[in-house]
RNA sequence: GCCCGAGUGGAGGAACGGUAGACUCGGCCGCCUCAAAAGCGGCUGCUCGUGAGGGCGUGCGGGUUCGAAUCCCGCCUCGGGUACCA
């Protein structure tokens, strides 16, 4: 008998899939009634090579695709590369050469690794976001946003990474550090492009209701990131400047307790407020000192520093003149950049008041007592009562809140306000390897969109693409100097490139036809395939990528380009693979290379083990020994199939009439139907491939045990079922064994279905407990009445009862009897 | 600090109110072999017992229930998210 040699088997079937175009899925013609499924894994960034996380991600998706194809769906399963970005550029700088060459090389390596793994990808739809044929449409989308007023350029303090020499989006700053390089991010004032994602904040929240199945924690993370809060805007009047300064508060009920006022150091009114006053030098000094500190430094430092401006402002309800201070715990980027400070009911304001000797006036108390001394009383529940609040005294706090807002509104001093933590998305980057922003700056016409027929704005070659604080594109003078599309006069191109997250915020639409040169997509095709039925990826994209993609989809829906509002109906987030308790990384030296494992054990064993490790949503610890077990299982299956074949059997799709089988044959056939049922349900309902595979292993064990005592038909049926069930996980070896059994193309075979006649049995084992402890087991006929089961159970444990009278007996039909004594 | 998630044999895990530890790895014993590898068979939670059998066991402490790894309350540990957001 020939041995199981994965390398030969895998090469053979990969070739067959390619020549027979097994996984190429054309778009259904209009009116085609095919049931479609779009299964998508997050596209890889083409760094050096695939890591174990990719293997897990794409193997999960591939198993689903195979099962769904065989259950009659037309499945779209494409692949592409998120190819612009810093790592390729940094590698090129390190090694010399062009980022494009590094990227091309990496893509070639990753593609061949993917083919080596045998994932059933429709390679005719392959795309790369750095190709002009792709980014032409990224630029088109940018211009859609520009035309709708959703893309704008403004000067503001931005997050700057000194190492990457570029700005970063809010979402890319983690604990004050650059997500990419880990460098401390500093603040810098620059003129940059933004997307008005804040305009979609409420819809990003509301449309979560349209999502069919997303992990609750991802939704929670997005909700927290969007950070909706309800409160009121209150305008305080400053007499010296004769100006209103608005604040945002979630606690308008505490307005009577606002004993001072704080403005952020970056607030534009600060210079005006102190100009010419004796406090001017001290205040400007504090502002300078603050802006010199890094974001991280400021975030870490919880001490309440600040400086008095010497000015006062009028509390609109008490009429009191309260002092204005500058303090860096008030953030320019949230609310209005100014706050009313209520030290009695806000911890931060309380600390500040204590540190600087400012008055503390409680205005809310518990229903049956006084507010605590020496700390902020921040409780905000329904049964609190007002005090020190004029005519509102004695009123319930929630009623007072409404009444105070109404009063402010009547006086024109405020109104109810909803506020969001989400800020606009900064998309400019001062780096070379990215998509050019298709905008021309004209002295006469201002910022002008490059017309559609002039797209793409091709990324020019430059002599030196190292980061230098401004975009390397600025040195391509021939490219930069152009003519204004509107007036024809001399003009210059925008030299910043786009955040690469833009490229990956719409790629799932382009797969519908990546070769369409007339449009980004055809609406009838995207509406046919999308929303994506199942999206699969790492939870690390819970905010950035998934929020941006949802935003783009809504904008494009509003533009009439899409017939759906959410891109991904169902999301599955896989757990990470660890080694020695830590995330695999080159610096820790705990990388396990998929290539080496595939070479040693075969792609099928690697795929099988990655799925067998545990539930895919859980983090998992890599163990080198496990893959050997996967290989042994396949080898034993291989040997079994060849023995079955040698005995003269082949593919057997029907176990026959259960009544006609011998007891041993019935056992084997039952196990097979049990495995079909379990593997199908565990895979489809919960993606728990680990237990589906275990069911296959149990089936193999049972066939091996009964091979010689059961009749050949039952053995052939069970063996056929085993090969068929394992195909989505180990497609190469399953295909080979199917052929050995005389079958043709397993990937086109219908998915097996379990027969109820084999899932139930004539007899059942009843567990007999005394006081919840197992004392015996009895075998009884399946339909036996509760009374008879009870009698049999009492019989079986008579010795244990030892004459004691049962106080109560619980009978769970078909399962157990519990006797309480 | 706040919000999630997870704690089960030597390891990964199974059991989603009803036999705790399926399946796999590792370990031990045996068969095969001149030998090794591979393969095949058996044992493998802890503990008392020669044995039959018993006791204890799902992070800790309570509770609900005839019955709890599973549900509820209070802790502990680990992981993730977020953090001066007014």
Image: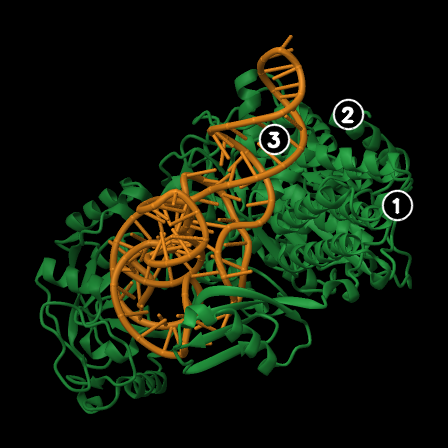
Chain colours: A green, B orange
Please identify, in this view, whether the residue under mark 1 or under mark 3 is nearer the observer: 1
Q: Seen in the image, is A630 located left or right of residue A124?
A: left
| Mark number, residue A3 | 2
Query: Along the line of sight, which residue is nearer the eye, A422 or A21?
Result: A21
Please identify, in this view, whether the residue under mark 2 or under mark 3 is nearer the observer: 2
Q: Are marks 2 and 3 on the same chain?
A: yes
Distance from the alpha carbon under mark 1 to that under mark 2: 21 Å
Q: Chain of mark 3?
A: A
Q: Seen in the image, is B86 located left or right of residue A668?
A: left
Q: In the rendered structure, which disc, 2 or 3, sits on the residue that comes first in sequence?
A: 2
Secondary structure of residue under mark 2 = loop
Residue under the image location 84 percent in, 48 percent down: A711
Q: Position of residue A556 (x, y in %)?
A: 68, 59
Which quadrant holds residue A187?
Answer: top left
Distance from the alpha carbon under mark 2 to that under mark 3: 16 Å
Q: In the rendered structure, which disc, 1 or 2, sits on the residue that comes first in sequence?
A: 2
Q: Position of residue A622 (x, y in %)?
A: 51, 35
Distance from the alpha carbon under mark 1 to that under mark 3: 28 Å
| Mark number, residue A51 | none
Q: Which residue is mark 3?
A: A628
Query: Along the line of sight, which residue is nearer the eye, A396 or A555?
Result: A396
**Can residue A158 be seen at all in this image of the molecule?**
no
User: CB of mark 2 within 8 Å of CB of mark 3?
Assistant: no
Q: Are marks 1 and 3 on the same chain?
A: yes
Q: Which residue is mark 1?
A: A651
Q: Is residue A820 above or below residue A610?
A: below
Q: Position of residue A424 (x, y in %)?
A: 49, 55
Residue under the image location 88 percent in, 49 percent down: A652
């Amino acid at each position: 008998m020939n041995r199981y040699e994965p390398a030969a088997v895998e090469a053979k079937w990969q070739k067959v899939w390619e020549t027979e175009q097994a996984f190429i899925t054309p778009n259904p013609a209009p009116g085609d009634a095919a049931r479609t499924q779009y299964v998508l894994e997050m596209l890889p960034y083409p760094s050096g090579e695939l890591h174990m996380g990719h293997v897990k991600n794409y193997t999960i998706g591939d198993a689903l695709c195979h099962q769904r194809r065989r259950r009659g769906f037309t499945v779209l399963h494409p692949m592409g590369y998120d190819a612009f970005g810093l790592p390729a550029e940094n590698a090129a700088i390190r090694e010399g050469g062009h980022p494009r060459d590094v990227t091309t090389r990496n893509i070639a390596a990753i593609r061949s690794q993917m083919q080596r793994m045998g994932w059933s990808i429709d390679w005719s739809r392959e795309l790369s976001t750095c190709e002009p044929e792709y980014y032409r449409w990224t630029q088109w989308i940018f211009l859609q946003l520009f035309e709708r007023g959703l893309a704008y350029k403004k000067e503001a303090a931005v997050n700057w990474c000194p190492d990457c020499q570029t700005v970063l989006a809010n979402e890319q700053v983690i604990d004050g550090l650059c997500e990419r390089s880990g460098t401390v991010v500093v603040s810098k004032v620059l003129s940059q492009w933004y997307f008005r994602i804040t305009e979609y904040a409420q819809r990003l929240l509301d449309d979560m209701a349209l999502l069919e199945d997303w992990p609750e924690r991802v939704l929670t993370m997005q909700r927290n990131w969007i950070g909706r809060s309800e409160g009121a805007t209150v305008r305080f009047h400053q007499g010296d400047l004769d100006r209103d300064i608005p604040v945002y508060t979630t606690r308008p009920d505490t307005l009577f307790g606002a004993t001072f006022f704080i403005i952020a150091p970056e607030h534009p009114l600060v210079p005006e407020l102190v100009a010419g006053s004796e406090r001017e030098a001290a205040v400007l000094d504090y502002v300078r000192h603050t802006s010199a500190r890094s974001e991280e430094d400021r975030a870490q430092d919880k001490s309440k520093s600040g400086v008095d401006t010497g000015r006062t402002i009028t509390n609109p309800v008490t009429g009191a003149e309260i002092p204005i201070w500058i303090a860096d715990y008030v953030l320019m980027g949230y609310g209005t950049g100014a706050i009313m400070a209520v030290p009695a009911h806000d911890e931060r304001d309380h600390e500040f008041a204590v540190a600087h000797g400012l008055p503390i006036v409680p205005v809310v108390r518990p229903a049956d007592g006084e507010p605590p001394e020496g700390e902020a009383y921040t409780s905000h529940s329904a049964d609190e009562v007002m005090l020190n609040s004029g005519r509102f005294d004695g009123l319930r706090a929630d009623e007072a809140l409404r009444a105070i807002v109404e009063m402010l509104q009547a006086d024109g001093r405020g109104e109810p306000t909803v506020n969001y933590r989400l800020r606009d998305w900064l998309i400019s980057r001062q780096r070379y390897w990215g998509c050019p922003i298709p905008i021309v700056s004209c002295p006469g016409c201002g910022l002008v969109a490059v017309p559609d027929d002039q797209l793409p704005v091709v990324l020019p070659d430059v002599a030196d693409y190292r980061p230098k604080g401004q975009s390397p594109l600025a040195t391509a003078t021939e490219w930069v100097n152009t003519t204004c599309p509107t007036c024809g006069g001399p003009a210059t191109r925008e030299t910043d490139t786009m955040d690469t997250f833009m490229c990956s915020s719409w790629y799932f639409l382009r797969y519908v036809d990546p070769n369409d040169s007339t449009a980004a997509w055809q609406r009838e095709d995207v509406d046919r395939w999308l929303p994506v039925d199942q999206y699969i990826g790492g939870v690390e994209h819970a905010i950035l990528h998934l929020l941006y993609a949802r935003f783009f989809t809504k904008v494009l829906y509003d533009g009439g380009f899409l017939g759906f509002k959410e891109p991904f109906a169902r999301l599955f987030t896989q757990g990470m693979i660890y080694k020695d308790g830590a995330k695999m990384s080159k610096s820790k030296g705990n990388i396990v290379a998929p290539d080496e494992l595939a070479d040693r054990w075969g792609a099928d064993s690697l795929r099988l083990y990655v799925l067998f490790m545990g539930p895919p949503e859980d983090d998992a610890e890599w163990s080198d020994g496990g893959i050997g077990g996967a290989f042994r299982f396949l080898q034993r299956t291989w040997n079994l199939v060849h023995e079955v074949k040698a005995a003269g059997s082949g593919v057997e799709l029907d176990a026959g009439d259960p009544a006609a089988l011998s007891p041993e044959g019935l056992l084997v056939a039952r196990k097979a139907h049990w495995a079909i049922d379990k593997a199908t349900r565990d895979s489809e309902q919960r993606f728990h491939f680990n237990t589906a595979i275990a069911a296959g292993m149990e089936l193999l064990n049972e066939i091996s045990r009964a091979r010689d005592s059961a009749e050949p038909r039952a053995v052939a049926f069970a063996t056929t079922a085993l090969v068929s069930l394992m195909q989505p996980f180990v497609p190469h070896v399953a295909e080979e064994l199917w052929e050995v059994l005389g079958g043709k193309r397993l990937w086109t075979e219908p998915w097996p279905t379990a027969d109820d006649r084999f899932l139930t049995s004539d007899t059942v084992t009843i567990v007999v407990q005394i006081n919840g402890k197992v004392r015996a087991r009895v075998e009884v006929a399946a339909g036996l009445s509760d009374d008879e089961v009870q009698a049999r159970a009492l019989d079986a444990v008579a010795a244990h009862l030892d004459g004691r009278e049962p106080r109560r007996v619980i009978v769970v039909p078909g399962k157990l009897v519990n006797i309480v004594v």
